[in-house]
Amino acid sequence: MTAAWALFLIDALSVSVGWPSALWIMGADFQRNWLQFLIFAGANLLCFYALGLYRRESIADGTKALGRIPTIVVIGVAAASMVTIILGWTLSLGLCLAAAISFTVCGALARLAFAVLRRHSLFRTRVLVIGAGKRAWDLVWILRTQGRHWQYDLTFVHEDGFGEIDPRLSADPTNRVIVASSNLLKVADRAHADEIVVAPDERRGMALKSLITCRAAGYPVSEYMTFLEKEVCRIDIKRLDLAWMLYSDGFRTGRISTSLKRIFDIVGSLLILIPVSPFLLLAMLAIWMGDRGAIFYRQERVTRGGRGFKILKLRTMRVNAEAGGAVWAAAKDNRITPIGEFLRRTRLDEVPQLLNVLKGDMSLVGPRPERPEFIEGLATSLPLYHERHAVKAGLTGWAQVNYPYGASLDDARSKLSYDLYYVKNYSIFLDLRIVMQTLRVVLWPGTGVR
């Protein structure tokens, strides 16, 4: 069980005990209004997930997570209250206050309980790694910084034909390296392995019979790229194997999924655009009053199939900001106006792109559209860069909710690893997950990291 799932179950248990207790104390009629009370609990847990309380950085920094719980609970209570009003049920201020207090306390207690369990080294996953070279070291570093599980017990099996042992692995006493083991099944049994990962630097001459014996004995056996894709939800560009990319599962699209995505785009865009319109009008007025310049900014971008289109955004930079030519935007760009800084921080400058979505140039979810001036250079340096154009560009995307703001080649490489994962594993459920997590990035900028 992953740490995130364990924490979710503790949250659910805490809410299932604490919420009915709060209702009993306030004398609520649970039998008559059980569905309403269940909606409040469900909305709370959904917001816990959508706003990032089960992400790696929130699990690692419990203090920061505790500080966010009250805000998230207020959003959850507000969402449940809206559903209650729409359904025509009675809603009282006392119920909302009881829910806010109860869910905040439940969330805090759940994280304290989780911290106690974590100190006793629970939630470990045991992995037997074939190979102990540079690829194995990359695996260790990625798992420690981005893995879904909180802790990993790693055992490495190495043979002379795999190349040299990476000194960074052997220097760490927590890494157990076994050289030239003749009985791989016995090693897996002794290590109580949950999974075997094949990750040697040199695979020629590797004995497959022992791996087949482990597979027949019930041990899952994964190739390096497949294991990392599952664990960190991205594709490792640094060690990309084109043959693996070609033969692995994914890249499945059909008429039904395409139609569902288009319906999702239209309905979602209208649901966002209508309530946000008053704030959009105020933002437009503020831009015009700032320097009497143009309100909107149109720029050439690239979407599905390499087709160009004009993206529509609120102007956040001074007039003629690119008189000297196209330049990558930076996090603290001196071309950004004071009102533009606010619009970027709140993401209001992106709202007009919903018109691009309604028009069909973009989707709500997809790789962010890049400028044609930069694409050829990026495609020369980054393998499979053009493959991100297999789907429509998006208002938000998997890279945006998982990687912080950046404007360099290394940042583009990291974002491409998430974009390729999205293109390869697209589903309407992944789109819903990204849309929910986008709210977290809006509320807490800079949290787009795993």
Image: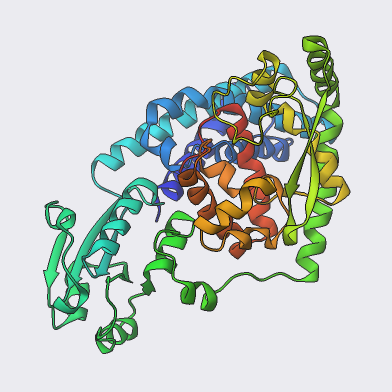
Q: Quadrant of the N terminus?
A: bottom left
Q: Give residue 167's position: percent from left, percent from top.
A: 14, 57
Q: Nearer the viewer, residue 144 or 363?
A: 363
The answer to whether residue 280 is seen in the rendering is yes
User: Residue 251: image x %, image y %?
Assistant: 63, 69
Query: In the rendered image of this protein, does residue 371 appear above or below residue 70?
Result: below
> Residue 59 vs residue 262: left or right?
left
At horizontal 78% and vertical 11% (from top left) the residue drawn is 291
Instruction: Give the x, y percent position of residue 93.
Output: 71, 17
Q: Is residue 212 left or right of residue 271?
A: left
- Residue 30: x, y in percent? 67, 34
Residue 272 figure quarter: top right
Q: How many marks?
A: 0
The residue at 13%/83% (across/down) is 182
In front: 409, or 202?
A: 409
Q: Nearer the viewer, residue 15 or 67?
A: 67
Up/down of 255 relative to 99, above or below: below
> Does 350 sit above or below residue 381?
above
